[in-house]
Image: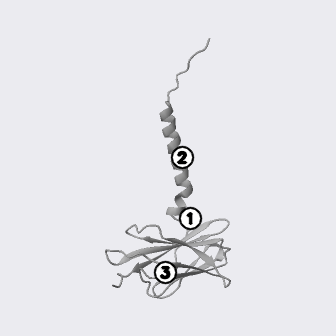
Amino acid sequence: MLVAMRIPFSLADLAIILALAIVAVVGYKYSPLLLPKADLTVEPAAGCDLHKQACHADLPGGGHVELSITPHPIPVVQPLKVSAIVSGVAADTLEIDFAGVSMNMGFNRKTLVAGSDGRHTADAMLPVCVTGRMAWRATLVVETRRQRIAIPFLFEAPIAAH
C-alpha cells in the first residue's frame, strides 16, 4: 500500500528559496567589487597630507608602502597619477579605491600596474561634488598571497574650478 506524503512546500516556494540562495551566493562572490574587502586595515602615518607629498604606512612583518597622488593639490575632474611603492612585502595586486566619506560618489576603483622600477601606477579622476568641498577616502588595497591589507588615506578635494 502506498502512502501519499504531503509536501509542505509548493513548487513556487522552492523557486523563491532557490532564487534567494542564488542572490546570496552571487552577492557574496561579487561584494569585493563594491566594497574593498580586507583581512587587515593599517592606518597611515600621522600628519599625512596627500595634497603636499607622498604618504606612507608601515605594514605588518616589517613591510612599508608609500602612496602619492599628483598633481598637488589634488584636483577634481582632472587627470590624476596614482603611484605606490611597496617594500618588504611581495604584493601580487595593488588597487586604489576612491570613496566619498559622507556621500556615495559611485564606484571608482583602479588597479595599479607594476613598472620595472618597482613602482605601481594608475591614472584616475575624482568626480565633482555639487555641494562643494568633499572629504575622500583613498583606500590602497595591497593583496599578497596570504592576505589583503587596506590602508585608508583621507583627504579633502576642493570645489571644481569653472
Q: Earlier in the sequence, mark 1 or mark 3?
A: 1
Report crowding for label 3: few under 14, some 14 to 19, many 20 or more residues within 10 A (C-alpha): few
Task: Kindly identify the residue that appears in the image at 53 percent across and 62 percent down.
Answer: 33
Report x, y in % for residue 48.
48, 83
| Residue 57 found in image quarter | bottom right
Secondary structure at badge 2 equals helix
State the mark number for residue 72.
Answer: none
Image position of 68 with respect to 24: above or below: below
Report crowding for label 1: few under 14, some 14 to 19, many 20 or more residues within 10 A (C-alpha): some
Secondary structure at badge 3 equals loop
* Circles 2 and 1 in contact, beta carbons < 8 Å: no
Image position of 9 with respect to 73: above or below: above
- The quadrant in which the N terminus is found is top right
Q: What is the three-letter code of the residue carrying label 1?
A: Ala
Report x, y in % for residue 149.
58, 69
- Which of pointers 1 and 3 indicates the residue nearer the eye? 1
Residue corresponding to mark 2: 22
What's the distance in space between the residues labelled 3 and 2, CA to CA? 44 Å
Residue corresponding to mark 3: 46
Q: How many marks?
A: 3
Residue farthest toward the left in the current orientation of the protein: 131
Q: What is the three-letter code of the residue carrying label 2?
A: Ile
Report x, y in % for residue 159.
35, 81
Looking at the image, residue 94 sits to the left or right of residue 116; the answer is left
Task: Kindly identify the residue that appears in the image at 50 percent across and 27 percent down.
Answer: 8
Residue corresponding to mark 1: 38
